[in-house]
Image: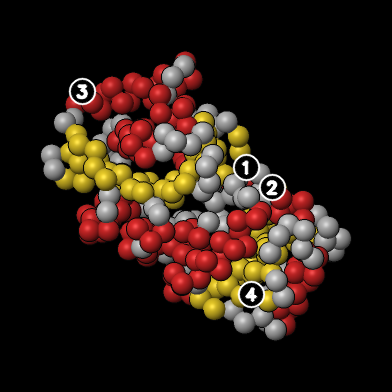
Amino acid sequence: MLQFQPIAPEMRELVLRYTTPWHLNSSEYTFTNLLMWGTNGRIKLAEHDNALFFLLKYGKQEAFMFAPLTLTPQGDYVRAVKTAEEYCLQNGITPLFKAISGPIKDAFSQCEDYELFEDRDNYDYIYRMEDLLTLAGKKLHAKRNHINQFRARYEFEYVEVTPRMIEECMEVYRIWLEGKDVFEPGVLGEMEAIHQILTHMEFLGVKGGGIRVDGRLVAFTLGEKMNDEMAVIHIEKADGNIPGLYTIINQQFIEHAFTDVKLINREEDMGLEGLRRAKLSYYPTMLLEKYEGRRKA
């Protein structure tokens, strides 16, 4: 029987021991993502027989798992999935595995009792760093206009975000939240997630950037390098009443924090129409496909 424990900062080396050999580009398996969204026992981990298992439970949703990881992609992956399946069935959980992409998809495809289904709402949006930095070309002309209009209208200051700015960042989040459906996908637990990542950002190696207008923090963003080629943006929040603010914080953060990578992963759109439209408007160089694994009928 798997013995699951709530994720905690001291599990970082355990997670990295399993994720590093897989060379993953998906955002879900970064330790930062697991820690920030796993508050209050929402994400639990178990290690057994050279495999790492991820159990997730959000609100009233039925529990599910991320696809397990063996110590290397050459491990006995079918046995790991079988172990996870047995745990689910013994605990009244319908076996469902998410975050299946890249080399995990190749491994999971060995499980003959399972089918893979596209999970479009959780595709990661991946961009060329240079495109987000320069916003060059006809396709991004509107983005350059947004920045020019913002610069003409506002005196602003770009600042590095640190853990000492938690309260300022949470105030930006509260302004962003006004008028939104708190039960919208991704919002559940987001305030705790932001507080968690800000609290542990130095330990996690997370970088932060913010925009001040008239001395007030009006936008902030948080991200980290996943590997030598790619960085991931975990959080981006701004006062939506200020035109062009999202465009400027996006561009400025890349300029100050991530010019040493080739690609930027801006995570998924969760099926939200407005977010999907916004992410597509930056013309990603690729969408990282993800799948769900379900038992065959």
Decide which of 57, 84 is in the foreground and name it.
84
x and y percentages locating residue 132 in the rendered image: 44, 30
Q: Earlier in the sequence, mark 1 or mark 4?
A: 4
Q: How far apart, in angstroms, are the residues tagged by discs 4 and 3? A: 55 Å
Q: Amino acid at mark 4?
A: Glu
Q: Earlier in the sequence, mark 1 or mark 2?
A: 2
Q: Residue placed at 47% from the left, 46% from the top?
A: 225
Quarter that holds the C terminus: bottom right
Query: Nearer the viewer's eye, disc 3 or disc 1?
Result: 1
Q: Residue placed at 73% from the left, 57% from the top?
A: 73
Q: How far apart, in angstroms, are the residues tagged by discs 2 and 3? A: 44 Å
Q: Earlier in the sequence, mark 2 or mark 4?
A: 4
x and y percentages locating residue 25 in the rendered image: 59, 47
Decide: is 284 above or below 34.
Answer: above
Q: Earlier in the sequence, mark 4 or mark 3?
A: 4
Q: Residue placed at 46% from the left, 16% from the top?
A: 137
Q: Amino acid at mark 2?
A: Gly
Q: Which residue is mark 1?
A: 288
Q: Amino acid at mark 3?
A: Ala
Q: Residue placed at 63% from the left, 50% from the top?
A: 23
Q: How far apart, in angstroms, are the residues tagged by discs 1 and 4? A: 27 Å
Q: Is residue 38 left or right of residue 241?
A: right
Q: How far apart, in angstroms, are the residues tagged by discs 3 and 1? A: 36 Å
Q: Which residue is mark 4?
A: 47
- Are dots 1 and 2 in contact, CB under 8 Å? yes
Res. 102 mark: 2
Q: Earlier in the sequence, mark 3 or mark 1?
A: 3
Q: How far apart, in angstroms, are the residues tagged by discs 1 and 2? A: 8 Å
Q: Amino acid at mark 1?
A: Leu
Decide: is 172 above or below 273.
Answer: below
Query: Nearer the viewer's eye, disc 1 or disc 2?
Result: 2
